[in-house]
Image (spheres, rainbow, N blue to C red):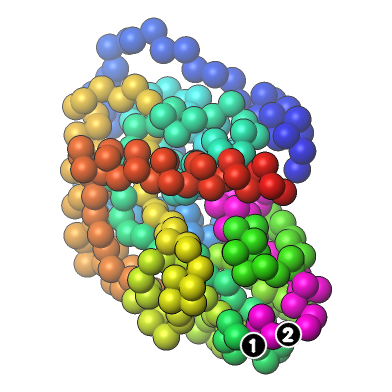
Amino acid sequence: MKKSTIIGALIVSAVPFISMSPAFADFPDGDIDFIAPASVGGGSDYLIRSLQPALEENLDVSVVPRYLAGGGGAIGFMKAANSRPDGQTVVAIDNKIFTQQGLGNVPLKYTDFDYLASLYSVPYVLALSSDLEIDDLESFLADENNQDLRIAYAGTGSSTNIMAILISQKLGVDYQKVSYPGAPEAVAAVMGGHIDGMVMDPMDLRGALESGDVTPILVTSGERSDALPDVPTMKEKGYDVDISNWRGVAAPAGLDEDTKARWVEALRVASEDPRFVKRIEDLGLEVNFQAGPSFDEYVENLSESVIPVAESVANDS
């Protein structure tokens, strides 16, 4: 999607909120809008649905998922950033916020949010259709037709978009890169034989991995993932890549401290809820709750590593 097209869509869909520093009502004051900046069925949706029961019990209101796919997460992020900073709207957030800023496609910065908590992190995975009978990285690199392969990612400007390009550059394989509206659509295309592979995270790939329809070739984290212990990292193979995706929750910048503290506590309790823990462990992952000053530092460090990657990809592509 062209930069002007994304910005035009955002101008139509989001009217900026101008804070007048009102005296907010006690939080929560009605149902919570929990924005997924992606399609139904993807990793953001899974996070929201996994947190929902415990959050509703703790906050004593309904938590309503709002799906705003498009622009690689830009549509949903802009809607969240321009919402009233009263705690009634939050967004599922991850590396997409940094890649959007690095690409410069939208007037959006990661500092437009208050970061409440991170729940876990996952690597990116290059996975191919099992019908190709390419079982490892060496076979992929040796395939004389590898540049003809069509590799999907979830939305222009998304972190999977950036990682699909970065992996291509590092491996020296200029495979075809194909955008889909979201992870579920990309996975369905691979499983339906319409495309050859994808760059996603294990949450988005869980069904295809369990069915054996896709074969994971490599992961981008510095260490092997518990979700895919048999899949080598790019570092193991001699490529200087150590980037993981995290899944967390953020609110429009400007939350008062009491509301932020109430949200952090609700998320902490939800992260320890057996239902949430089981859903995350079912993916082969571990809950890793982070909040407070250490989490703010984590977000800042991530921004300093991921934004330059997105900027360099934008300049080279």
Q: Quadrant of the N terminus?
A: top right
Asked if disc 2 and disc 1 are in contact, CB closer than 8 Å, the reply is yes
Residue 250, x across and y down, in percent: 37, 39
Residue name at image x 66 percent, y 43 percent? 314
Residue 222, x across and y down, in percent: 38, 66
Q: Mark 2 packing: few (<14 Cα in 10 Å), some, or many (20+)?
A: few
- At mark 1, the secondary structure is helix
Give the amino acid type for the residue marked by disc 1 in the picture: Ser
Is 248 covered by the magenta stretch? no
Residue name at image x 78 percent, y 83 percent? 144
Residue name at image x 27 percent, y 63 percent? 287
Residue name at image x 41 percent, y 66 percent? 221
Residue 92, x across and y down, in percent: 43, 46
Q: Which residues are magenta?
A: 140-163
Name the residue carrying label 1.
139
Q: Is residue 282 visible?
A: no
Front-lying residue, 262 or 97: 97
The image quarter containing residue 291 is: top left
Q: Residue furthest front?
A: 238
Q: Is residue 155 visible?
A: yes
The image quarter containing residue 74 is: top right
Name the residue carrying label 2.
143
Say if 288 sits above or below 66 in the image: below
Residue 71, x across and y down, in percent: 65, 43
Give the amino acid type for the residue marked by disc 2 in the picture: Asp
Q: CA distance from mark 2 to mark 1?
A: 6 Å
